[in-house]
Amino acid sequence: MDINQQRIANREVVVKAVNGWPLLGFLLLLGAAAIAGIPYGAVQDRPPVTIAAAVLLALTVVLLGGLFSLQPNEARVLVLFGSYKGTVRESGLHWANPFYSNGAVQRANGATFEVLAIARRNSSRNKISLRARTLNGDHLKVNDKGGNPIEIAAVVVWRVEDTAQATFDVDNYETYVTTQSETALRHLASLYSYDGGDENEATLRSNVDEVSKALREELEERLAKAGVRVDEARLTHLAYAPEIAQVMLRRQQAEAVIAARQKIVHGAVSMVDLALKELAEKDVVQLDGERRAAMVSNLMVVLCSESEVHPVVNTGTLYH
C-alpha cells in the first residue's frame, strides 16, 4: 500500500459511544454488591461466594475504566489493539471498551522519557481538543526576494479537523504545525520583496492582505496532511535586520524626499501655467518671451522654495 492509499484509510469516522450515566449507576450497584459479598462469603464460610464476589469486583473495576467524559469541542480517538475504531465527538459522559489503548503513547516508544511523559499527560486516553488554537511564531531572520535580510513573524489560528489524520498520519501534530508554519513563512518571505519592488509588484510591506492570504493558502496545503485546518494567518512583525536597518531607513527617507519634490514641482508647474493663462485671458499685462521666462522663474522659486521668500519691488523696468 502506498502513502496516498494509507492516508485515505486514515480518514476520521465519527461513532457514538454508550451513554455513561446509566452504566455508571449499574456498575456502582454491582461494585457495592461485590464488596458486600466478599465479607458475607467469609462469615458464612462459603468460598465460592467469596471468589465470585472478588471476580465481580475485579470486573467492575475493569468496566469502570471504560468511562470517559468529553467537553464541548473535544474528541476521543478509539484504538483497539492498534486498529482505529472511530472518533467520539459528542460531549458528555460516555462508556467504551476499556481496552481501547492510548495510541499517542504507543507511537512515542522511540522518543525520550521526557517526551513520553508529556505524551501521557497531554493525550488523556487519546483525547484531542477541537478548539481553535493560536500559534504566535518567533521572529525569523530570512532573506526577501531581493536578498535583503529581514525579520518576519506571523500568527496562525488553527484547529484539528480530522482527528484520525492528526493521530496517525503525523507523529506529533502540534510540533508538525509549528515546524510547517515556520517553513511556510520562510518560503513566503523569499517570494516577495520587502518594499520598492517593480511596478504593480506585491511587496511584504505594502500588500499585507495579499501576503497573508498567500501564507494561509500555503499553510492549508502543508497542514492538510495532519488533518489541521487554518482559520487565519497574518504577519505580526516585519522589519529590516538590524545590520542594514539604518541604511534602508536612509534610503526610504531619500525616496520620500524625492516623491515629495516631484509632487511640489508638479503642483508648481500647474499653478504657473494657470497664472499665465489667467493673465493672458484677462489682458492684465502683455508679456513677451523674456518677461514670461522671468515670471516663470520667479513663481517657481516662490512655490518650490523650502524657506520663506521675500519679494523685491522693482520700481524700474525689466531691462534697467
Image (cartoon, helix red, strand yellow):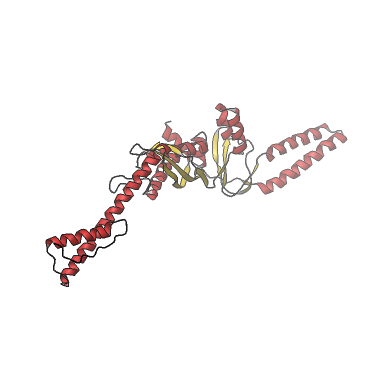
Residue 243 coordinates in the image, percent (x, y): 41, 36
In which image quadrant can residue 62 be found?
Answer: top right
Residue 213 coordinates in the image, percent (x, y): 39, 48
Above or below, 204 relative to 311:
above
Above or below, 250 relative to 41:
below
Which residue occupies 68% across, 39% down?
63
Which residue occupies 47% across, 45% down?
155
Asked whether the viewer can see residue 202, the reply is no
Quarter holding the N terminus? top left
Which residue occupies 27% across, 57% down?
304
Quarter holding the C terminus? bottom left
In which image quadrant can residue 270 be found?
Answer: bottom left
What is the count of numbered marks? 0
Along the horizontal axis of the image, is 53 left or right of 65?
A: right
Residue found farthest to the left? 288
Along the horizontal axis of the image, is 32 left or right of 99?
A: right
Task: Identify which residue, 304 or 239, lies in the foreground.
Answer: 304
Residue 116 coordinates in the image, percent (x, y): 59, 31
Asked whether the viewer can see residue 135, the reply is yes
Task: Identify which residue, 58 or 78, lies in the foreground.
Answer: 78
Above or below, 176 relative to 302:
above
